[in-house]
Amino acid sequence: MERKIEWETNLSAAISRAQGESKPVLLDFHNPN
Amino acid sequence: MDAVTYPNLDVIQFIRGHVVPVRLPFDAKPEADNFNVKWTPTLIILDHNGGEHHRTTGFLAPEELVPMISLGIGKTHFEREEFTRAITSLDTLLKDYPRSDSAPEAIYYGAVSRYKSTHNPQPLKEAYEKLRAEHPSSEWTKRAAPYRLL
């Protein structure tokens, strides 16, 4: 298994994927600096 | 989170199996305003229609992040009135992470889910007794205190 989380970077895309997979969304607001 | 929690294999595996992860900068427009984000990290559990059901702010270690997500999943099912699925998620949290910071709230919502699905008040009273015994200082023990009278 790849040792990293494969983050979506677009909320609309994540919600569309969540609908297809019948899963909730984990939304992380972070400070990239 | 990037140094400790997100590289953890248990965290990676859990996220892969249970949620769709999305990461945005704290100043992303319009999302940061729409979700009223004022500090990082802010972690929010959404249902698959984008509705918010649970959030936390601040660092979480791996052994706290996984139960926090489980609690969010359980609350998502609860608030969508999917009580059987809520009970399953919350019971799994309590089996795997019984001493986590999310456990008291999971006990509370597990009991409420059982009550809402059966109208039997006994799980509420049992939840208070369990909270009092296992988490006497928790705010959720205080919130469940009226159930001792049932």
Image: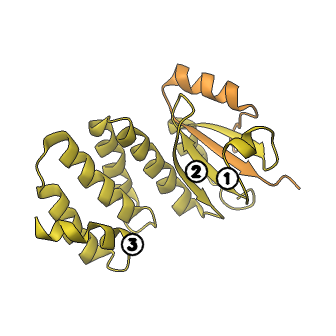
Counting residues from the start of the chain, the first of labels 2 and 3 encountered is 2
- Residue receiving disc 2: B11
Residue B6's tag is: 1
Residue B120 position within the rendered picture, expressed as x and y whole percent measured from the top left: 10, 49
In the rendered image of the structure, the colour used to display chain A is orange
Q: Mark 1 lies on which chain?
A: B
| Type of amino acid at the residue the image marks with label 1 | Tyr
Colour of chain B in the image: yellow
Q: In this view, does B88 lie above or below B95?
A: above
Q: Which of B15 and B44 is in front in this view?
A: B44
Residue flagged by tag 3: what amino acid is it? Glu
Discs 1, 2 touching: Cβ within 8 Å:
yes
- Decide if residue B14 is on the left or right side of residue B92: right
Q: Taking A18 as reference, is B73 left or right?
A: left
- The circle drawn on residue B139 is 3
- Give the chain of mark 3: B
Tell me where residue B59 appears, x and y as whole percent.
Answer: 65, 64
Determine contact: label 2, label 3, CB under 8 Å: no
Element on which disc 2 rests: helix
